[in-house]
Amino acid sequence: MVGVKALIHLFVEPGRLEVVGEALSKFEEVTDVFEVTGEYDIIIIVNTTDVTSFRKFIADKLLTIPGIRSAVSSIVLHVYKKGGKVTYE
């Protein structure tokens, strides 16, 4: 069971989107990687067992990828709808 689900919004250095996206895709904790328009460059969804594991993922994996300028994290507190279906997660 997943203990922490988070959305992480990333700012990426110009010309590094593809390299960063591919690097993120290799991490077991990362379930989705989206290149997006708007304020951020990439949004990822991350699942870890607990907050300690989440912190370790950020420090030891995410922020070691060359080309990531900064990250803004949002931890999911409650899911109302998922996969097109109402849920009570």
Image: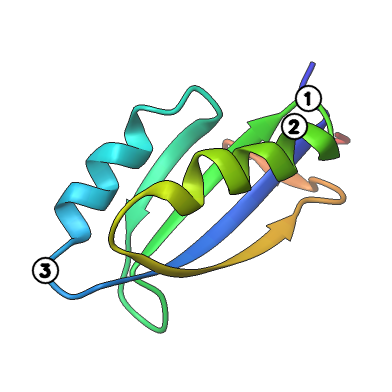
Q: Which residue is mark 1?
A: 49
Side of 22 relative to 2 (left or right):
left
Residue kind at label 3, given as amino acid type: Gly
> Is any atom of residue 84 visible in this view?
no
- Badge 2 or badge 3: first in the primary sequence: 3
The image quadrant that residue 87 belongs to is: top right
Q: Is residue 36 above or below residue 89?
A: below
Q: Which residue is mark 2?
A: 53
Residue kind at label 2, given as amino acid type: Ser
Residue kind at label 1, given as amino acid type: Thr
Side of 61 relative to 16 (left or right):
right
**Which is closer to the viewer, label 1 or label 2?**
2
Q: Which residue is mark 3?
A: 15
Q: CA distance from mark 3 to mark 1?
A: 33 Å
Residue 77 at x, y percent in the picture: 86, 51
* Contact, mark 1 vs mark 2 (Cβ under 8 Å): yes
- Badge 3 or badge 1: first in the primary sequence: 3
The image quadrant that residue 88 belongs to is: top right
Q: Is residue 32 above or below residue 35?
A: above
Q: Secondary structure at mark 1?
A: loop
Give neighbour class at mark 1: few <14, some 14-19, many 20+ (Cα, 10 Å): few
Quadrant of the image containing the N terminus: top right
Residue 79 at x, y percent in the picture: 79, 45
